[in-house]
Each structure stands twice: as C-alpha cells, then as structure tokens.
Image (spheres, coloured by chain):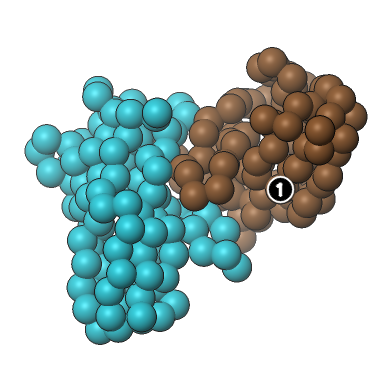
Chain colours: A cyan, B brown
Amino acid sequence: DSGVTQTPKHLITATGQRVTLRCSPRSGDLSVYWYQQSLDQGLQFLIHYYNGEERAKGNILERFSAQQFPDLHSELNLSSLELGDSALYFCASSVAPGGTEAFFGQGTRLTVV
Amino acid sequence: EDQVTQSPEALRLQEGESSSLNCSYTVSGLRGLFWYRQDPGKGPEFLFTLYSAGEEKEKERLKATLTKKESFLHITAPKPEDSATYLCAGGSGAGSYQLTFGKGTKLSVIP
C-alpha cells in the first residue's frame, strides 16, 4: 500500500458526460501528479500540483482540468468524454516538487461507452 | 522530444535464469532515472532512482545501473513472484518533476 488513495476504483459513463476523479496523497506529501495510462500510449504525464499551485502541464486535453485543495487532496475533472478517454488514471504524490520518487495510487479505471 | 524506449517488450524466463532489461533514454535535463514495477490492474510501485552515470542500486534480486544513454535492470535468479511489467522513466523539469515513461517490459518467470 503506497498510502495514496484514489476514488472511485472503477467508473463507467457515457460519451459526452463529465466525471471527477479524486486523489488523496500520502500524509505529508505536498506534490500531486496525474497520469493517464492507455494500452497504446503507456503512462502519460497530465499535470502537477504542488501545495495548491499548478506547477506543470503535460499532454492534458483542454476538456480536462484539475485542482488541489487546501487539505492537499486533488481532483481531476474530465468533461465531454469521448470513447478514447477510456484509460487508467493514476495519481502520484511526493514530498517535494522535484528530485524525489513519486508514489502511485491504485488508479481509477474509466470506461466511456 | 523526450523519449524512453524499453526492450524487450516481453521476456519469458525460467525460474533461476538471470537476465537484463534495457532502457534507452533521451530526456532533456534529466534529473533522475526511475524504475517501477507494475502488477496487472495496480499502480506502479517504486523500485529505484538513479541520478548519475555509473550509479548502481540493488534490492533483493534486482540491480539497476545507469550510463549516459541507458539503464539496465538486472534480475538475478528470478522467482515467479518477480513476474510483472517493469517500467523505466526519466524525470525532468524545473520546479516540477515530470516522468517520461517507457512502455515497459512484461516479465514472466516460469516455475
């Protein structure tokens, strides 16, 4: 158990809908990263928050957004969902913004039908 | 563009048969090379971070090494419980730490 908690574990929704994925980092970790894992692309970095502030954006679509709250939990919002958004979404946390290992949660499996 | 390439894509070993997994990287401003293990349907589990060429780290039957262009994960006398996908990632970014992952090597260890 990495100490990073993601909910829900599974989510099935229809095209065009909006969903919110939640992540609670390890106790004491200020950084939260979001990654998307699909069969053909592998793990892709989406976005990084540190202590409530956005630090970096990767291959994140405009339909996707995220935020980190004062209690350090983070949410990833996915809207206008398409079939191609079906993937595993992972959250990772680390103590510092850089230079240390990131610990991953168990992921949320999103299926868009 | 940052790139991490892992080979082979899949590897089948007999229990006790040692081998190595390869990770070639081109990551601008590399600040660390990471190895993770991922079991089916689970999140990646951190194994090692390597920071400079020549560095080596060991954990049980695993040893990771780093050169300026490649990293190797050596598996000595593997057991069936070592079966998993092994992911390599390059860490980069100023004020952040984005990981660029390879697609992984799926290792199967046959009893």
Camera-nearest residue between A90 and B14: B14
Q: In which image quadrant can residue B38 be found?
A: top right
Residue A40 shows in this picture? yes
Give the mark count: 1
Q: Which residue of the protein is positioned furthest toward the left in this rendering?
A: A70
In this rendering, position of residue A100 left or right of residue A82: right
Residue B68 seen in this snapshot: no
> Eyeballing the image, is B88 above or below B78?
below
Quadrant including the C terminus of chain B? top right
Q: Quadrant of residue A19?
A: bottom left
B37 left or right, relative to A23 = right
Task: Give x and y (percent) for residue A56.
Answer: 35, 51
Tell me the amino acid under the disc marked 1.
Lys
Q: Residue furthest front?
A: B111
Q: Position of residue B86 (x, y in %)?
A: 66, 41
Report the residue that reaches farthest toward the bottom.
A16
Location of residue B53 with respect to A57 vertically, above or below:
above
Relative to residue A44, is residue B65 drawn left or right? right
Q: Is residue B2 left or right of residue B13?
A: left
Return the residue at label 1: B106
- Local SS, label 1: strand
* Relative image position of residue A111 (x, y in whole percent): 37, 70
| In the depicted structure, whether residue B66 falls above or below residue A15 | above
The residue under the point 27% across, 35% down is: A25
Which of the two residues, B44 or A70, is positioned nearer the viewer here? B44
Q: In which chain is the residue bearing label 1?
A: B
Q: Quadrant of the N terminus of chain B?
A: bottom right
Residue A2 on image: x %, y %: 39, 29
Dot 1 alpha-carbon crowd within 10 angstroms: few under 14, some 14 to 19, many 20 or more:
many
Question: Would you place residue B48 above or below residue B70 in this image?
Answer: above
